[in-house]
Image: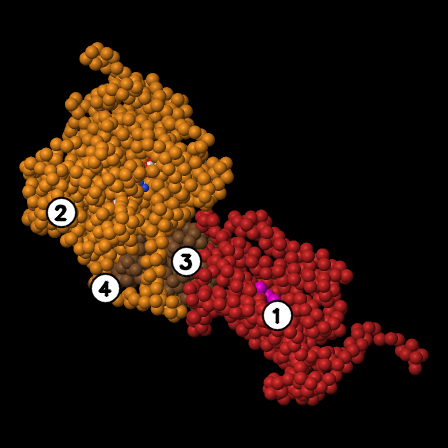
Chain colours: A brown, B red, C orange
């Protein structure tokens, strides 16, 4: 049984933020005006979160790239009154934009606060429409969106594999963030498939998941940095 | 009012005369107030039209402050709605005779405020146009859906529960012919106050009174659950169901008190809303202020004692952080003020209860605020809360808030122009039957007198 | 792109208002885009190219759909970037489609800088250019044509130089990011090029102020080295960042050593002291390949202190600790670690050179590599070569050209070493004299009004120059002041070559090819130069006999085809395979005929040669003595002429760090740094980057400065307040952010950012103008400022 998941090695991540931008580019994530951004309405499906501790010169900082955790037991899906957010048989938690009524209950239910709401109609300067990715629909206003594990890439890769009737290779389905990461800190694949790197990595002694105690069963693992 | 109607009114017995007068006689003060409220309502509608057109961006909401004023109002209004139906039902069932004068006004509050409660979450939707997806794609595991169900049941139930006991009065109006005969002929549904009709009516009321109680309880429990079912700090708490129900009744009582005082002044119903009513309601308020404190204290102590970091961030934000002012105002309004006032008999007067009532209503609104906002702006993940999150309602939200309040008051006023705000027949019944009945009932409680004494009287 | 937020919004607004039906659409809750785009599956294409956003020159792959560039992905075949990219590279998509881009030549109609333009055809624009230049040349004043270019390593650089030489002007001012490091290498090794650092194989990387993970020559080179190391803890690299600033590099390195500003050199010699004292330096290497270590007596019999004595005398650990603020035990530990690791390398940051004793500090830092013999060996400093492309044809210069060449260039450094800051010198020279020494100025990749340290001088210079043309695809500050703008096409629309920066030790000749079609009216600046040459005729035409840029690139690629080494870019396996073969002295041509080779070259995105012969002595030193010099004669002479009695190395200790002119008016030290999201000096950020320009600080769109919370509270400035940063030289507005990683009394200020309204927030302009007397390079950390709330 396929269970797509991600392992992020915090010992390699340099917090460069390439994953953030690659995600925005791949998924037509809209940018907002300065005042909107200051209001806390900027989108970032992938967000490299930081935590600073200690004062100069004993300062230290942690980086933590944060996509949707694609919980196996997702609180967001439980509470959606119209099943506009759902979990598919391979464990990818998706959104149905045309169905979402914009109640934002899922956003409140998500312990990882990875959901973003379209407060206004997402807009692009005329010239920049050209770079919108046709594989991903742009969102209307008033609906919730979030990281989808670049699900559209899976669909494409599957079709290809089916045409050539062979099974899908690990390298064929890689989300944009994993693809761009210059340090290969993001590893993506099928957590159940022994031929995929994530399958071993997820049981690495350094592996942990965020707020495991909540029982949400995230499918994004982190390898904590070595001292 | 025209002489004809005046004459008709004059022929009626005193209770009718007094209680039906508002239906046919309207002061200019009424029109002015109504006009002002109407203006506010229109302004609110305009504000909403902007929000509808450009999206929720017109509010002050953001990430992670996904819910704001609208949800606060939603919880608040539904809370108020527990005034009528629930209270009057309890009083009916417990055969509290002093209820007779106040049930009607209370039930009206319920039905009207419930409507306004129900529209708030719709106003809060990003896509109101897709509202019906709640039916087409209903996902039964969502507390939001339970809520939709329970609220609609409650609305129907309490509307019926308002209507049925009103039928005899409607019949009276129909017969008096002082106002829109066709309307009241229709509403009175051929009720002729024959003994068996009366008997059937009483039976139905009895059943409804019992049936409606669990519904009412469920409604606010479920609203509490909407929050409690998430894993958010200081939402995820088993106490929320009962806590919300208690709070609801509390704010309900306060609302009735305010309504009573105003009606008393406006339609000088002095000898219907008597000191005893204010005294008793005041006691109720007192009781609930203590309950409120008990629940709140329990809730916060548990959070504090557990010292769970995520919980503590929210906790301190409320107690000593950016939300300290609203928090302590809430405590004052919901506890200290009503307690100190209602503890004293001399204060359980219209004036005293009015002050206490207003305090409680404000306090309970703040309580909703204190529940919704601080948790929202303090996400569970400590790395998230690094960002300095904040929430200032936009003018659109505030206008809609004003609009809904004004709308409610306006409708209530109008209602008093079509329906007797004190149940005529129940008062009558009280006069005719109950006095005797009560004497007997009370007699029934007491030990029977010894026979020889009886003989002596002979 | 000059990010003018207001216009950006206008554009956005315009889109929204499309057909003014938009409001209505809002009512129908449709996202306008969705309808218009109608998501029909399109024709998808992928091509390799190279990112030109910064000097890093990473390999990219463009994903186009129906001729639109929808994504930029890494090129896995590129040996340096190996498929990785930095956020700026990905953001290039938005640079290409930026609303402020100008897609046709424009001619100034109003007064200069008034911003009134008339669109004209490329032909007309060219014609104007031609008769300007013809005129000058006919009038025998070719030297009065000047070209100021920003960073354009590779053929574009050669093209301009060749053109001007043949035309007859010495005034080609190219800002190849001169940072003095090449001077250090020239002095010590006799090799005038930036050192390459073999980060991939280094076990311990000690970076002196070099922002490896932010704005280094090639951040991705550092990322790849840092991130793709073997998984097991033992084989893991260690990165140690020595910096005055708690930068992201410092945050991520395994160790951060916070030092006092401008004392990097002192710390380096503090480490050297321990290596020498504890005899842990590579004595054998020093004995065989190095001079100037021991004391010596010159011909006149005069004794001189060698490196050893100078260091032992002047850099006792306690004293170094006191100067740098680094605890003694950390210095000792670091020195021992550096000695213990076979593959340890000290990376010298550009900014080390931009200090009061910049050059001497540079020598000090690099001397560590020499002491440990980490030169020309794996994990150390490698002096690579450029890709062996065919040179441009040498052609005899005609009379006019020769005459012109006799004039001395306007941009000339008075400092004994290096070229200093050419853009700055040029302006200074251009304002001298009664008549302007420049009659026609061409700006390529250059925006001095925004970037130069002396913008006022530049403005005066421009006022005097009768004809100014810019090739910028954006109306940047200087272009706005030009008479004619012939917008270059964007990097994703043109042919070019892209050699990796010297920080990467192996030559890579990246090929930039068009991923999408350029706007009809635009013209690649390269083609402009070629057609100019053609129209000007004479030796100019002869010197550039190429129909177009692709032909030119092809001609150069023949050099690669014939060297009988290297390979077109290939995957991991191919790379190792080829290296191993070359190590055994084998080389097999991948392609037998040139056309096939060229096609392969373009398809794979370039050429590389990953074999480095460490054995070749020329890779250690090309000095007269054939040895590495710790005490370069030239330097000694220069210091003697200076007459301040400064000794190499020792001087670092004496010449401390500048103090504030008036601690009352200007209490805070300004530490400028380059935000890692910044694509280029004066370009605003693309929307994606501007929205979250910094990871360490939570800011959006608005330029910011970082101050330690304690310092801020002393000043009574809350987090998030807008402040004016004021130095004796200038001022600008920024949002103040509290950041505990900032040293107390310091203001960390990212450069190159702009306000949404397009106004500059440029600490570079506040610099007090101090320069290193030896190199003439601006000092970046000697300026003091105050913060005023606005
Ligand atoms: N992102 C990006 N990268 C680029 C470029 C670009 O436009 N964008 N352009 C290229 C260009 S033009 C150049 S010249 C280079 C410049 O790149 P560098 O000069 O290498 O990087 P900067 O950040 O400008 O240098 C300032 C660094 O010096 C550190 N520093 C602060 N105080 C001191 C001090 O007192 N002494 C020393 N030694 N260091 C100190 C700061 O922390 C900061 O990291 O970057 C190149 N790389
Ligand atoms: N504000 C600020 N000032 C700085 C620096 C800084 O980082 N920030 N850095 C300093 C340093 S180290 C340096 S080296 C200098 C660099 O200063 P410059 O050499 O002037 O480089 P930039 O300032 O990046 O300006 C390059 C200009 O080229 C234009 N351009 C962009 N793409 C293209 C293209 O494809 N073709 C052509 N023809 N033009 C293009 C853009 O309009 C941009 O304004 O600036 C110095 N001054
Ligand atoms: S791209 Fe990779 S290294 Fe950069 S921030 Fe994301 S995960 Fe970290
Ligand atoms: S992370 Fe949040 S949004 Fe993602 S699946 Fe889990 S609960 Fe749902
Ligand atoms: S916002 Fe949309 S997805 Fe989330 S719960 Fe409401 S309807 Fe479901
Ligand atoms: S998986 Fe895809 S959608 Fe999720 S963060 Fe990465 S790029 Fe974005
Ligand atoms: S480092 Fe420079 S060249 Fe490489 S991707 Fe980033 S911007 Fe492009
Ligand atoms: Mo530079």
Residue C136 within the magenta-colored segment of the rendering: no
Q: Which chain carries label 1?
A: B
Residue under pointer 3? A116
Q: In this view, does C632 lie to the left or right of A10?
A: left
Report, in whole angstroms, how far the alpha carbon at label 2 lies from the one at label 3.
55 Å
SS under mark 3: strand
- Which residue does the image show at 22% across and 33% down from the upper left? C433
| Start-end of magenta stretch | B74-81
Residue B79 within the magenta-colored segment of the rendering: yes
* Mark in the foreground, 1 or 2: 2
Residue under pointer 4? C42
Question: Residues at badges 2 and 3 in contact (C-beta under 8 Å)?
Answer: no
Q: Mark 3 lies on which chain?
A: A
SS under mark 2: helix
Q: In this view, does B161 lie to the left or right of A10?
A: right
- Which residue does the image show at 67% across and 84% down from the upper left? B2
């Amino acid at each position: 049984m396929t269970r797509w998941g991600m392992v992020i090695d915090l010992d390699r991540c340099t917090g460069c933020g390439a994953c953030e931008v690659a995600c925005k580019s791949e998924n037509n994530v809209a940018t907002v005006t300065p005042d909107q951004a200051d209001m806390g309405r900027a989108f970032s499906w992938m967000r490299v979160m930081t935590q600073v501790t200690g004062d100069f010169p004993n300062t230290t900082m942690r980086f933590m790239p944060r996509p949707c955790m694609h919980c196996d037991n997702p609180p967001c899906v439980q509470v959606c009154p119209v099943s506009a957010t759902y979990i598919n048989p391979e464990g990818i938690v998706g959104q149905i934009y045309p169905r979402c009524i914009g109640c934002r209950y899922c956003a409140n239910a998500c312990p990882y606060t990875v959901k973003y709401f379209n407060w206004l109609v997402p807009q692009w300067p005329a010239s920049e429409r050209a770079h919108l990715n046709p594989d991903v629909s742009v969102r209307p206003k008033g609906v919730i969106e979030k990281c989808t594990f670049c699900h559209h890439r899976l669909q494409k890769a599957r079709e290809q594999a089916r045409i050539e009737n062979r099974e899908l290779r690990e390298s064929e389905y890689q989300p944009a963030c994993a693809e761009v990461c210059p340090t290969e800190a993001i590893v993506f694949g099928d957590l159940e498939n022994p031929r995929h790197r994530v399958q071993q990595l997820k049981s690495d002694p350094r592996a942990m998941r965020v707020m495991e105690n909540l029982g949400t069963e995230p499918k994004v693992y982190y390898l904590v940095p070595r001292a | 009012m025209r002489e004809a109607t005046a004459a008709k009114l004059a022929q009626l017995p005193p209770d009718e005369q007094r209680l039906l007068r508002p239906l046919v006689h309207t002061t200019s003060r009424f029109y002015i107030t109504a006009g002002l409220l109407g203006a506010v309502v229109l302004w609110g509608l305009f504000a909403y039209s902007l929000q509808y057109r450009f999206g929720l961006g017109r509010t002050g909401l953001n990430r992670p402050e996904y819910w704001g004023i609208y949800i606060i109002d939603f919880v608040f209004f539904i809370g108020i709605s527990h005034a009528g139906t629930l209270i009057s039902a309890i009083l009916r069932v417990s055969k509290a005779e002093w209820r007779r004068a106040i049930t009607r006004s209370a039930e009206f509050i319920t039905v009207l405020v419930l409507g306004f409660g129900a529209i708030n979450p719709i106003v809060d939707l990003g896509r109101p146009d897709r509202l019906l997806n709640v039916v087409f794609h209903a996902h039964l595991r969502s507390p939001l859906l339970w809520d939709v169900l329970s609220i609609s049941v409650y609305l129907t139930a309490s509307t019926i529960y308002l209507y049925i006991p009103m039928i005899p009065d409607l019949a009276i109006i129909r017969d008096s012919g002082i106002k829109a005969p066709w309307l009241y002929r229709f509403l009175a549904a051929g009720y002729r106050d024959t003994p068996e009709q009366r008997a059937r009516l009483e039976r139905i009321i009895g059943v409804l009174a019992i049936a409606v109680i669990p519904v009412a309880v469920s409604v606010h429990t479920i609203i509490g659950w909407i929050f409690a079912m998430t894993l958010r700090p200081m939402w995820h708490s088993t106490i929320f169901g009962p806590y919300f129900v208690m709070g609801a009744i509390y704010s309900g009582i306060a609302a009735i008190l305010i309504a009573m005082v105003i009606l008393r002044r406006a339609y000088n119903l002095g000898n219907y809303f008597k000191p005893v009513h204010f005294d008793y309601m005041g006691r109720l308020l007192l009781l609930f202020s203590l309950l409120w404190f008990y629940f709140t204290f329990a809730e916060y102590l548990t959070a504090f004692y557990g010292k769970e970091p995520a919980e503590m961030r929210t906790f301190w934000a409320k107690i000593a952080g950016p939300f300290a002012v609203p928090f302590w105002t809430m405590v004052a309004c919901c506890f200290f003020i009503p307690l100190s006032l209602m503890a004293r008999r001399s204060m359980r007067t219209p004036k005293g209860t009015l002050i206490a009532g207003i305090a409680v209503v404000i306090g309970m609104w703040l309580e909703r605020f204190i529940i919704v906002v601080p948790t929202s702006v303090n996400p569970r993940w400590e790395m998230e809360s690094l960002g300095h999150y904040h929430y200032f309602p936009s003018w659109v939200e505030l206008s809609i808030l004003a609009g809904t309040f004004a709308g409610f008051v306006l409708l209530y006023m109008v209602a008093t122009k079509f329906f007797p705000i004190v149940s005529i027949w129940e008062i009558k019944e009280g006069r005719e039957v109950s006095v005797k009945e009560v004497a007997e009932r009370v007699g029934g409680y007491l030990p029977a007198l010894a026979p020889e004494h009886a003989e002596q009287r002979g | 792109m000059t990010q003018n937020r207001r216009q950006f919004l206008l554009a956005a607004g315009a889109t929204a208002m499309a057909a003014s039906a938009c409001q209505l659409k809002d009512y129908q809750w449709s996202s306008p885009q969705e309808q218009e785009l109608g998501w029909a599956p399109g024709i998808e294409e992928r091509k390799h190219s190279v990112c030109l956003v910064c000097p890093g020159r990473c390999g990219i792959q463009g994903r186009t759909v129906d001729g639109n560039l929808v994504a930029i992905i890494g090129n896995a075949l590129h040996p340096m970037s190996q498929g990785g990219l930095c956020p700026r590279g990905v953001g290039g998509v938005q640079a290409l489609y930026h609303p402020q881009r100008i897609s046709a030549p424009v001619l100034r109609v109003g007064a200069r800088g008034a911003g009134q333009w008339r669109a004209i055809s490329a032909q007309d624009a060219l014609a104007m250019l031609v008769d300007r230049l013809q005129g000058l040349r006919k009038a025998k004043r070719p030297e009065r044509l000047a070209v100021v270019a920003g960073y354009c390593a590779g053929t574009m650089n050669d093209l301009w130089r060749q053109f001007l030489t043949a035309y007859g002007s010495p005034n080609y001012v190219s800002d190849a990011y001169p940072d003095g490091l090449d001077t250090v290498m020239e002095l010590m090794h006799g090799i005038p090029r930036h050192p390459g650092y073999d980060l991939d194989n280094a076990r311990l990387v000690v970076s002196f102020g070099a922002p490896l993970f932010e704005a280094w020559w090639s951040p991705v080179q550092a990322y790849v080295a840092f991130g793709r190391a073997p998984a097991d803890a033992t084989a893991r690299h260690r990165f140690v960042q020595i910096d005055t600033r708690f930068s992201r590099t410092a945050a991520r390195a395994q160790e951060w050593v916070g030092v006092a500003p401008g004392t990097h050199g002192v710390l380096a010699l503090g480490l050297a002291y321990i290596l020498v004292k504890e005899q842990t330096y590579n004595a054998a290497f020093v004995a065989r390949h190095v001079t100037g270590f021991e004391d010596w007596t010159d011909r006149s019999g005069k004794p001189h202190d060698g490196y050893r004595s100078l260091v032992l005398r002047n850099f006792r650990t306690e004293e170094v600790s006191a100067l740098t603020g680094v605890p003694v035990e950390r210095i000792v530990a670091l020195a021992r670690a550096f000695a213990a690791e076979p593959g340890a390398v000290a990376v010298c940051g550009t900014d080390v050179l931009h200090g009061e004793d910049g050059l001497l500090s540079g020598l000090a830092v690099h001397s560590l590599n020499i002491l440990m013999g980490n030169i020309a060996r794996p994990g150390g400093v490698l002096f690579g070569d450029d890709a062996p492309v065919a040179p441009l044809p040498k052609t005899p210069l005609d009379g006019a050209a020769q005459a012109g060449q006799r004039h001395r260039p306007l941009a000339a450094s008075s400092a004994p070493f290096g070229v200093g800051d050419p853009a700055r010198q040029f302006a200074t020279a251009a304002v001298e004299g009664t008549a302007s020494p420049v009659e026609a100025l061409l700006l390529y990749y250059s925006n001095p009004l925004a970037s130069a340290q002396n913008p006022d001088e530049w403005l005066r210079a421009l006022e005097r120059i009768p004809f100014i043309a810019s090739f910028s695809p954006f109306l940047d500050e200087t272009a706005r002041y030009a008479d004619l703008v012939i917008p270059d096409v964007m990097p994703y629309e043109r042919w070019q070559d892209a050699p990796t920066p010297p920080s990467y030790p192996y030559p890579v000749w990246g090929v930039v090819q068009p991923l999408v079609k350029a706007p009809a009216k635009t013209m690649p600046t390269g083609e402009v130069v070629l057609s100019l040459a053609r129209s000007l005729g004479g030796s100019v035409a002869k010197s550039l006999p190429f129909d177009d840029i692709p032909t030119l690139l092809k001609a150069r690629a023949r050099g690669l085809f014939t060297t009988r080494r290297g390979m077109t870019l290939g995957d991991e396996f191919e790379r190792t395979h080829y290296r191993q073969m070359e190590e055994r002295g084998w080389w097999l041509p991948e392609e037998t005929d040139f056309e096939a080779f060229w096609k392969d070259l373009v398809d794979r995105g370039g050429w590389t040669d990953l074999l480095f012969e460490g054995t070749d002595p020329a890779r250690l030193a090309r000095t007269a003595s054939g040895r590495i010099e710790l005490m370069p004669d030239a330097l000694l002479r220069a210091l003697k002429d200076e007459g301040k009695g400064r000794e190499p190395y020792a001087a670092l200790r004496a010449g401390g760090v500048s103090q504030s002119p008036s601690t009352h008016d200007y209490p805070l030290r300004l530490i400028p740094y380059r935000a890692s999201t910044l694509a280029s000096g004066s370009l605003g950020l693309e929307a994606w980057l501007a929205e979250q320009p910094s990871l360490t600080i939570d800011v959006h769109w608005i330029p910011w400065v970082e101050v330690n919370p304690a310092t801020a509270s002393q000043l009574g400035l809350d987090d998030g307040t807008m402040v004016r940063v004021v130095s004796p030289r200038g001022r600008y507005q920024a949002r103040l952010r509290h950041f505990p990683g900032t040293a107390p009394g310091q203001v960390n200020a990212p450069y190159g950012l702009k306000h949404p309204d397009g106004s500059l927030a440029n600490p570079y302009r506040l610099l007090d103008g101090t320069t290193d007397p030896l190199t003439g390079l601006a000092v970046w950390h000697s300026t003091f400022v105050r913060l005023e709330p606005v």
